Amino acid sequence: AFESLNELLAYVDKELRRFDAGNVVITLAQIPKVAGDQDLSHFSQNAAWLDLQDRAHKAVGRLEPRGLSMLAYALARIRGWRDEPLIKDVLEASLKRIEDFGPTDTAKLAWVLAKLQIKDKARELWTALSKEAARKICSSGRFIDISMTAWAFAKVGLAERVLFGQLATAALTCTDLPPHTIANLVWAFAKSGNHNPPLFDMLAGRAIENFREFD
C-alpha cells in the first residue's frame, strides 16, 4: 500500500506504460484513499498525474460496468480536482451500459451524480438509474445499496414516491444495518418528505439497540 500521494505518483511515473485499462482505474481509485482530506489541486500539473489522466480518458471505452463505476466513484472522491470531460465520458458510457450494472455499481453511480451535483445535465441517466434501482437494488437485500440510493435521489430532489416506497419495503427486510446507513436513510426519507412510519419505527428501534456504535 502507498503511504503518500507522492509515492503513488512516483510508481505511476515508473510503471504507467505497462498499465491496462483496469490498472488505470485501480490506481485512480487509490488516490482518494491515500490522500484522505488533502486538497489535490496543486498536483494537477504533475507530469505523472497528467499522464494518468490522459490514460483514463483513453480507457473509458474499454471498461466494463464495474470499471466504469469504480472510475466514477474515484473521480467523485478526489478533493480539489475535477476533470469535466472525463466525468462526462464516464457518465455517457455508463448510460449505454446501465442495464449491465449490478446493484452496488448502480447505487454508487447514483451517489456519484449526487456528490458531484450533476442533475439537469444527466436527466436521462437519473431516469435509467431509477428504473435499475427499482429492478435491482430493491431486491438485492443490501442495506448499504438501499441507503446510498435513497441518499442520492433525495440529495438532488428526485425522490419520487414510488421508488422510495420500494426502497422502504426492501429496507424493512434487511438485517445488517450499519449506523451510517441508518442515518443516511432517515435523512433521505425526511429530506424528501417520503414519510414511512413502519420504516421509521424499524430504524429507530435499530438505532436504539446499537446507539453505542454511532459517532
Image (cartoon, rainbow, N blue to C red):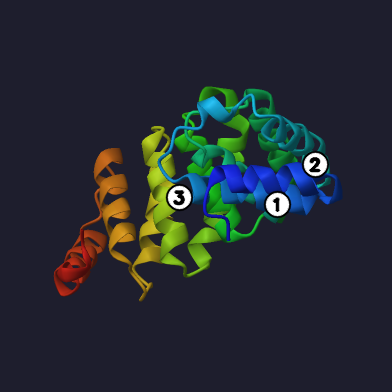
Q: Which residue is mark 1?
A: 67
Residue 28: % across, % down = 64, 45
Is residue 64 in sight in this rendering?
Answer: no
Q: Earlier along the polypeptide chain: callout 3 or callout 1?
A: 1
Q: Earlier along the polypeptide chain: callout 2 or callout 3?
A: 2
Q: Residues within 10 Å of mark 2 (few under 14, many from 20)?
A: some
Residue at the (37%, 64%) spot, across then down: 171
Residue at the (53%, 38%) spot, across then down: 76
Numbered tag placed on residue 149 in the rendering: 3
Q: Residues within 10 Å of mark 1 (few under 14, many from 20)?
A: many
Residue 103: % across, % down = 57, 59
Residue 4: % across, % down = 53, 48
Disc 3 is placed on an element classified as helix
Viewed as shown, does residue 207 lie left or right of 20? left
Up the image or down, 187 lies above or below 135; here it is above
Q: As shown in the figure, which amino acid type bears the numbered disc 3?
A: Thr
Numbered tag placed on residue 59 in the rendering: 2
Give the image quarter of residue 146: bottom left
| Whether label 2 touches label 1, CB < 8 Å | yes
Viewed as shown, does residue 129 lie left or right of 79? right
| Whether label 3 touches label 1, CB < 8 Å | no
Up the image or down, 107 lies above or below 193; here it is below
Disc 2 is placed on an element classified as helix
